[in-house]
Image: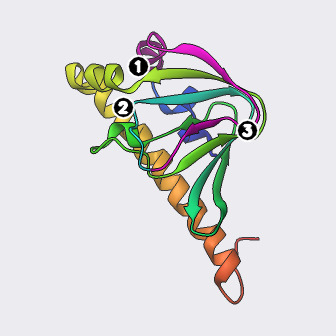
């Protein structure tokens, strides 16, 4: 993921510190599911070490991997947008250490501090835009006659 979407460069230091004050350290074993599609999105994570795959259910097949995420990257965006349900699934494809955030606590902080809330919303918008572009390129590589032309 590009550097403008990782936490270290996406949020100004003062907002990053406020967000990190709400973090707790967690870990996931290889193969652990962080979340499933259509379930409540009540938390999110920033990866410290390891890799998490975002995936989508495909009837009659294993989930299709949409994106692999690593150090400094955000896992989960649906917590910020009603109806607060996951649109994808996520699985640890290596042992993962992460910072976990309670979605309601972060949303409350966003509501109380408009500047912080705007910074978080812009960060999430950049992450989503990047992931949509990445998914577009992958789909073109898979299904377009000559691929995406990005290689």
Tell me the mark number nearer the camera, choosing from 3 and 1.
3
Q: Are marks 1 and 2 in contact (CB under 8 Å)?
A: yes
The relative height of residue 36 versus residue 63 in the rendered view (above or below) is: above
First reached walking from the N terminus: tag 1 or tag 2:
1
Residue 25 occupies which quadrant of the picture? Answer: top right
Q: Where residue 30 sits in the image (x, y, percent)?
A: 76, 34
Q: Is residue 82 visible?
A: yes
Q: Total marks drawn? A: 3
Label 1 crowding class (10 Å Cα cut-off): few <14, some 14-19, many 20+? some
Q: Secondary structure at mark 1?
A: helix
Q: Which mark is residue 31?
A: 3
Q: Where residue 137 sits in the image (x, y, percent)?
A: 62, 69
Q: Which residues are magenta?
A: 13-37
The residue shown at (69%, 75%) is: 141
Tell me the mark number nearer the camera, choosing from 2 and 3.
3
Q: Which residue is mark 2?
A: 119
The residue shown at (53%, 53%) is: 130
The residue shown at (54%, 62%) is: 133
The residue shown at (40%, 46%) is: 125
- Reply yes or no: does residue 14 show up in magenta: yes
The relative height of residue 148 versus residue 106 in the rendered view (above or below) is: below
Q: Which residue is mark 1?
A: 15
């Amino acid at each position: 993921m590009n550097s403008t979407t990782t936490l270290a460069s996406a949020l100004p230091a003062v907002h990053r510190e406020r967000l990190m004050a709400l973090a707790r350290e967690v870990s996931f074993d290889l193969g652990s599911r962080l979340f499933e599609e259509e379930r409540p999105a009540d938390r999110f994570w920033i990866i410290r070490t390891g890799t998490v795959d975002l995936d989508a259910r495909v009837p009659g097949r294993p989930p299709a991997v949409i994106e692999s995420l690593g150090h400094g990257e955000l896992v989960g965006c649906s917590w910020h947008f009603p109806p607060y349900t996951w649109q994808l699934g996520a699985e640890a494809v290596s042992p993962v250490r992460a910072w976990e955030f309670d979605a309601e606590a972060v949303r409350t902080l966003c509501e109380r501090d408009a500047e912080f809330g705007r910074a978080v919303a812009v960060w999430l918008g950049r992450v989503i835009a990047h992931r949509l572009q990445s998914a577009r390129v992958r789909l073109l590589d898979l299904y377009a006659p000559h691929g995406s032309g990005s290689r």
